[in-house]
Image (spheres, rainbow, N blue to C red):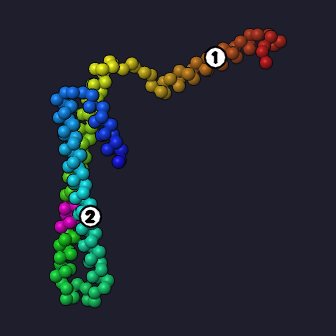
Amino acid sequence: MNEHEKDTVFLRQCILYDDSLERRQLDEQITRAQRDERCVRRAVWLMSLLTALSAAGLAFGAVLQENFPYGKPRFVINLLCEIGLASLISLLAFVCLFLVYRKELNRLRKECRRLATKLLESRLGQPRALPLPGVVKAQEFIAEHSKAIVSVSEMVTLPRGLRSH
């Protein structure tokens, strides 16, 4: 299972707590998009296999057949060329279709995130504003820096014998 599939499963689990029509429609659309994408992915693999097999057949004929393009089994060579070209064109079309389905699934996942956020806000309220991690570190650095300046200034003001070692 890749990251896209894990993310989709998690988001679908999150929105199961909502019992609205929007959630049911979104879940059906995600199921349909995943099924279509899986089907097209299988077609891409099949066309890749057919292209590779036809190329291997042509290579086999070129290596082992004497007088290759003009030999007796011209029908087989023509058939392999036609299968290879058709599968290559189909492969290109299926890859484009796969990208369209992936884009649609990404849009549905974004919609799922929006619905999950809306559900969490309705159940838990608005999130508290947390400072950014870089801002917290800068504030801690300033606080540590000011403590160091204070301790240095205390050392300067205290007589030498009264300073702690």
State the extent of the magenta-drawn residues as a range.
86-92
All told, the count of numbered labels is 2
In what element is the residue under mark 1?
helix
**Residue 163: which numbered mark, if any?**
none
Q: Position of residue 92 (x, y in %)?
A: 22, 59
Q: Residue at label 1?
A: 147
Who is closer to the viewer here, 34 or 19?
19
- Find the distance from the CA under tag 1 to the CA under tag 2: 67 Å
* Residue at point 53%, 24% (across, down): 138
Q: Is the residue 55 above or below the residue 27 in the image?
A: below
Q: Is the residue 156 above or below the residue 50 in the image?
A: above
Q: Is residue 147 left or right of residue 71?
A: right
Magenta span includes 52: no
In what element is the residue under mark 2?
helix
Identity, as a three-letter code, of the amino acid under mark 2: Ser
* Residue at point 33%, 19% (across, down): 124
Quadrant of residue 57 in the image? bottom left
Identity, as a three-letter code, of the amino acid under mark 1: Lys
Q: Position of residue 8 (x, y in %)?
A: 30, 40
Q: Position of residue 146 (x, y in %)?
A: 61, 17
Confirm whether residue 114 shows in the render. Answer: no
Q: Is residue 155 left or right of residue 9?
A: right
Confirm whether residue 127 shows in the render. Answer: yes
Q: Main secondary structure of the magenta part?
A: helix
* Residue at point 20%, 49% (across, down): 36
Q: Is the residue 152 above or below the residue 75 in the image?
A: above
Q: Residue at label 2?
A: 48
Quadrant of residue 75 in the image? bottom left
Q: Is the residue 40 above or below the residue 7 in the image?
A: below
Q: Position of residue 118 (x, y in %)?
A: 27, 25
Figure quadrant of the C terminus: top right
* Residue at point 19%, 44% (across, down): 32
